Amino acid sequence: MPTPLLRLVVLFGGVSAEHDVSRVTAAHVLAAADRGKYELVPIGIAKDGTWLRNDKAIAALTDGTPLPDALDVAGTVVDPLTELAAHAADTATVVLPLLHGPHGEDGTIQGMLELFKLPYVGAGVLSSALCMDKAMAKVVAAQAGIPQCRWLEFRDGVDDPNTIVADAVRQLGLPIFVKPANLGSSVGITKAHDEAELDTAINVALRYDNVVILEEAVTGREVEVAVLGDTAPETSVPGEIEPGSEFYDYEDKYVTGAAKLVIPAPLSDEATAQVRELAAKTFTAMRCTGMARVDFFYEESGRGWLLNEVNTIPGFTPGSMYPKLWEATGISYPDLIDQLVTFALGVHRRRVGFSTEH
């Protein structure tokens, strides 16, 4: 009797400004996953929160028809509990959340999956929430002794809006990068060159979050490291981004594709060893599991390595940095998916194995 396929539920879309990025990621992951190992179930989450099983994509996967570059959030409306938990009673199930940004990368979906007692790929509730909130991640990084650039936090309704611009210029200098604390894919990020631009940039960021991060502009190279694992994480060769515009923004990443990815990054052996060690240290400090991409600035003639941020659900298209880094390190795209599923099952066994008695 043939071994039954593992049911791999791919969640994509989501209630986030990164909805469309997620649709692209999901299409490529489904195309690369080994259909001899997995029963692939794509479920899209619409911007209004409706869950839809993409039966058209399931049919295409079954008969070998190519998928579109971006998966549609369309199909049969399903109840999350029924679709996820009910089937898991009969078939081994792992959930692969490919939901970038809030309500997907911030611990909300992860908490729901833990309540359903389902194994899932990637960071847990705490780590997801921590890494999504750039301000809190910076606090933990500082506590762990991980070097980073100078920064300030502005909380709408808490901090004084009449002094933040002057305070930021005095403490950080110009230009200043302004970011929503809880968003990714460079959405809502502005580089402000003067006080007027800074005031506008803060208001732009406040459209996406009530917490805003203001960072000094670092003159250095942008280098990223992929991390994979659990308690003893492995790191990839580092890769470097050469932005096609003033900084590596949303247009660079997903529209024009003007940014150049250099893999491996042209670094000395010493610098390479340093950044890989820092990436693993950061992964552990943030209590990550499964996968993360850890981004750094490199001031060769200054402070050296400075942590930028940690992405617990990094871009996962074949052209994205995370899978390309692992390919250069010796792990193919399909094998990477397999390893992530294996880690998910292992972490889940540990999580459900803890005693509930006292």
Image: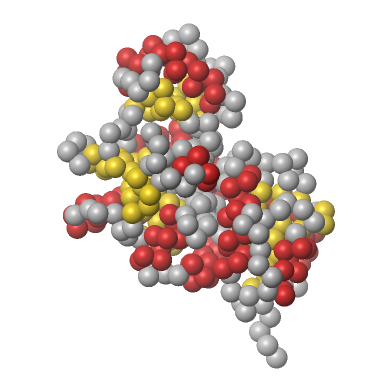
User: The C terminus is located in which quarter?
Assistant: bottom right
> Is 346 located above or below residue 243 in the figure?
below
Front-most of 93 and 77?
Answer: 77
Asked whether the viewer can see residue 42, the reply is yes
Front-most of 264 and 348?
Answer: 264
Asked whether the viewer can see residue 115, the reply is no
Q: Is residue 102 left or right of residue 232?
A: right
Specify the farthest residue to the top: 162
Where residue 249 appears, x then y in whole percent? 46, 38
Question: Looking at the image, which residue is at 82% across and 53% down?
Answer: 77
Coloration of the structure image: secondary structure
Tally of numbered tags:
0
Specify the farthest residue to the bottom: 1
Front-most of 248 and 270?
Answer: 248
- Quarter holding residue 183: top right
> Is 93 located above or below residue 259 in the figure?
below
Where residue 265 appears, x then y in whole percent? 29, 54
Q: Is residue 157 left or right of residue 175?
A: right
Where residue 223 appears, x then y in whole percent? 33, 48
Question: Looking at the image, which residue is at 73% across and 51% down?
Answer: 73
> Is 39 located above or below residue 287 in the figure?
below
User: The N terminus is located in which quarter?
Assistant: bottom right
Q: Is residue 182 left or right of residue 11?
A: left
- Quarter holding residue 93: bottom right
Question: Looking at the image, which residue is at 58% across and 55% down?
Answer: 25
> Is 10 located above or below residue 135 in the figure?
below
Question: Looking at the image, which residue is at 42% across and 69% down?
Answer: 331
Q: Is residue 4 left or right of residue 157?
A: right
Where residue 53 appears, x then y in whole percent? 76, 58
